[in-house]
Amino acid sequence: MNTNEVSRRSFIKKATALSAAASAMPTILTSVQGSAKAAAPKRVSASDRVNLALVGIGYQGQADAQQFMRSGLCNIVALCDVDMGAPHTLDIMNACPNAPRFNDFRQMFDKMGNQIDAVQVATPDHSHFVVAMHAMKLGKHVYVEKPLARTFLECELLMEAERKYGVVTQMGNQGHSGENYWQFKAWTEAGIIKNVTSVVAHMNQDRRWHPWNSKMTSYLPGEPVPPTMNWDAWMAATHPRAYNKDYHPGQWRGWYEYGTGCLGDWGAHLIDTVHEFLKLGLPYEVDPTYLLEHNPFFFPMSSTLIFKFPERTASGGPVVSGGGGGPRGSSNLPACTISWYDGIDNFAPVPEGFGGSVRQDADIPPPGGVQQPQRTRRPATGKEIFSETLNFKGGSHAAPLSIFPDEKAKEMEKNLPKVPPPPSNHYENFLKACLGLERANSPFSVSGLLAQTFCLGVAAQWTGKKVVFDRETKQIINNPQANQMLWGQVPRKEYVHYYGVV
């Protein structure tokens, strides 16, 4: 943590004051800073197309952009990337030759705000928040790649902004509009999935940063900035640091300062439906029971994290009484743990009766890297769900669940409800929500709590110690350093005003 840190309360107080007084700040952000009242959301007629701006057009941003264009529901009206013209941006630039181009999202909004209905945000984790908040304050609908934001505070403010500004929001966990979503919903409503007490999720393929972990003793030396690169804009609200190719376009996700590691990357594809439909909310404890090559700069090579969620009411609220050591109330949801395993050598025990293969999402290519040994009899990315009566197994993204062991699956086959086909994919769902035709499946009100759960896991990874979380005050109460991690560093002066919703 940088020494330029203040208390969370002081930070928010200062941010709110700066946001309210922003009209006195002479920057290019005149389109968003000076208004005490945010712009009303622009309503798009169902007979029109959504005018979509793309912020981040390489790698995942390229894949997102191609899906949006394929939908036929939008016009691409602006392109923005801090490395515009680099090889990974050329495909989208060539596909949208007439769209104006920018290397700073603030300049894009300043020049084209009136022509934009919605924004795709597919940048590194540390810059999701400022782009999304700028857009929302202008009344723009936002599609933000997972894991929504890098810090707990940023997720909190984005959820608050969604409520205040009334825009359509969607986090980019693509499987959350696919078969697994509709199956989990139908099976929960039919009582097939109920009284879940334990979930095991695992991602056992290597990540780009794995060879580095034990060598990290400091940040990286400076290198020449590529001629296509706006490095200052890439850093966004983080503290200034010299450019290095292993921040961009390299291993940014592996640095605590810029990313959320494997948990933030893949957790949203593995436990999203579990988290939503079991109404888990936020955990009260996260215990890092195993961390390989732990250091304060880079995520571990392997992690085992145990998330503990309390007994909840059927609506997901806290249990006012009877939630202690006595018997669980008949209408309450039982306490639940999620055990998270990542790393190429960190396998969860294979449960008894697991059986054969698990169906995977055919639309999602597997992550590159070392494949999990066949002896484990399950995919490198997947989950198992254990209830008081049934056990389930599944893959990532939209891959459907199946019941195990096989004999129990055959017994239950006739009792399973019919699952409707998905009416649209995740990208179409967002655009149709902007058009008033559907409701977004992964709005910030749903995905924000999931992303905050990951932030608590990251705090446990960073400190290497158990964190105890007060779900009412939203503070880690046993470790001041870990609590600091929830709201992060004080942002650079020109970005402080984003950290207030007025």
Image (tube, rainbow, N blue to C red):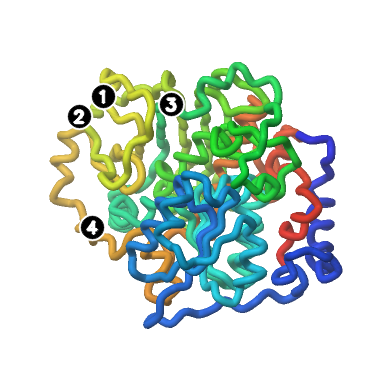
**Viewer can see residue 147:** yes
Q: Nearer the viewer, residue 266 or 331?
A: 266
Label located before the other in sequence (4 or 3): 3
Crowding at mark 2 (Cα within 10 Å: few <14, some 14-19, many 20+): few
Q: Residue at x 17, y 34 (%)?
A: 406
Q: Is residue 45 left or right of residue 285?
A: left
Q: Earlier in the sequence, mark 1 or mark 2?
A: 2
Residue at point 68%, 26% (across, down) = 296
Relative to 56, 256 lies left or right: right
Residue type indicated by callout 3? Asp
**Do labels 4 and 2 touch, CB within 8 Å?**
no
Residue at x 40% of width, y 51% of height? 63
**Residues at marks 1 and 2, CA–CA distance in whole angstroms:** 7 Å
Residue at image mark 1: 377
Percent position of residue 115, x then y: 55, 75
Q: Which residue is mark 3?
A: 206
Determine the secondary structure under disc 1: loop
Residue type at tag 4: Val
What amino acid is found at the position of numbered circle 2 in the picture? Answer: Gly
Q: Report how far apart the C-alphas of labels 3 and 2 lie in the structure.
A: 23 Å
Q: Is residue 500 above or below residue 412?
A: below
Q: Nearer the viewer, residue 374 or 259?
A: 259
Residue 295 sits in quarter:
top right
Residue at the spot of label 2: 356
Of helix, strand and loop, which one carries label 3?
A: loop
Residue on which the image places disc 4:
419
Report the mark closest to the observer, 1 or 4: 1
Q: Are marks 1 and 4 in contact (CB under 8 Å)?
A: no
Image quadrant holding the N terminus, namely top right
Identify the residue at the far front of this view.
227
